[in-house]
Amino acid sequence: MPKALSAKAVPGVAEQVVRWQISHGRNSLPWQNTQDPYRVWLSEIMLQQTQVATVRGYFERFTRRLPTVADLARASADEVMGLWSGLGYYSRARNLHRCAQIVVKQHGGQFPQQAALLQTLPGIGRSTAAAIASLCFGERVAILDANVKRVLTRWLAFEGDLAQVAQERALWALAQDLVPHEQAGAKAMARYTQGMMDLGATVCLARKPLCSQCPLQTDCRAHAAGTMQAFPVRSRKLKRSSQSLWLLWAQDASGAVWLQRRPAPGVWAGLHCLPVFDGEAQLRDALPATTRKSLQPQQVFVHVLTHKDLHLHPFYVRLTAGRRLPGLEGRWIAQQDWHALGLPAPVRKLLDTAGPAKGLGLKL
């Protein structure tokens, strides 16, 4: 592959993408039609590994409660995790909170306008930094998220293995060659950036690309060869694993649940959770002998993460109100209070079920 693309090699690519975005791209999402870097940044972080349909509701709730970066910086960790609960990849929320605090303390509440500076903030990688800088400040800098990688590697028939740093760097250079020229202006840069994201999300799909709707179809090398599924090339595949965890679901007569904050690092780090154990024997040993007799095993269910399947074994026990669980970290949280806490998605679903008396019937 060439290290750079000449102007003759890519006639009007940026202009085609800009025109397509205006008439066919996504223009009504709640984080669009704004140059507010807070909203753009928040949406970019939420959209990492998460579908637009899922993010929309979270984004609207988050910005309604915390409408500015200063509001986010002032919020408690529990409030932030509570608003994020269910989106997964909770390190994103922790970095989001830290980043807001740094923006307020070190940058006077204003996001840096250059991608290089944005990249120094927690949780903001190269592509996210470029998205903020180009969409909000018109900087001529390329993005290269998973969707855009798919568009470009197909259009170029880029055979470099993106698991190799040198090949990823080469694709970044080619992506930068394609951004609109300086004379096009900031609006064109923002449209182009949005257009590339839209193409990857709605047209150049991973399994069934809609090539007839793509403005770049004419010059797309993968389309011409019928090899769209061969790109992008990445030799290193994520290896899936599985893990079994036992959950102690202790509830008192008032409906309060015993919760503890998960340690970091580890699964669900920083979230409030039912006590977690590596085996049934450990769970039973953590309780007084009189309490163990009342344990009720519940239906085992599987929670699927990106890289791991969690086999969860809940054990339910009902205790008298206010009774302590000696030797077990945590505290009783009333039902009206735990709803607002950051809880792992499977634990939230477990607690939201009708309860053991009616049978869980969980499909998580």
Image (tube, rainbow, N blue to C red):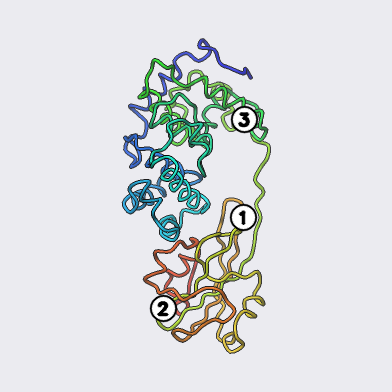
- Residue 364 seen in the figure: no
Residue at x-position 41% and y-position 20%: 16
**Which residue is identified by label 2?**
255
Q: Foreground: 330 or 298?
A: 330
Callout 1: SS: strand
Which amino acid does the dot numbered 2 rest on?
A: Gly
| Mark 2 neighbour density, 10 Å: few (under 14) some (14–19) many (20 or more) | some
Residue at x-position 52% and y-position 19%: 177
- Residue 276 seen in the figure: yes
Image quadrant assignment for residue 47? top left
> Percent x, y for residue 248?
55, 74
> In whole angstroms, how far apart are the C-alphas of marks 3 and 2?
53 Å
**Which residue is identified by label 1?**
308
Q: Is residue 239 left or right of residue 11?
A: right
Count of labels shown?
3
> Percent x, y for residue 334?
40, 74
> In whole angstroms, how far apart are the C-alphas of marks 2 and 1?
32 Å
Q: Foreground: 115 or 303?
A: 115
> Percent x, y for residue 110?
38, 38
Residue at x-position 46% and y-position 57%: 86
Q: Is residue 184 left or right of residue 156?
A: left
Q: Is residue 35 left or right of residue 177?
A: left
Q: Label 1 near label 3: C-beta < 8 Å? A: no
**Which residue is identified by label 3?**
168
- For marks 3 and 1, the one nearer the N-term is 3
| Mark 3 neighbour density, 10 Å: few (under 14) some (14–19) many (20 or more) | some
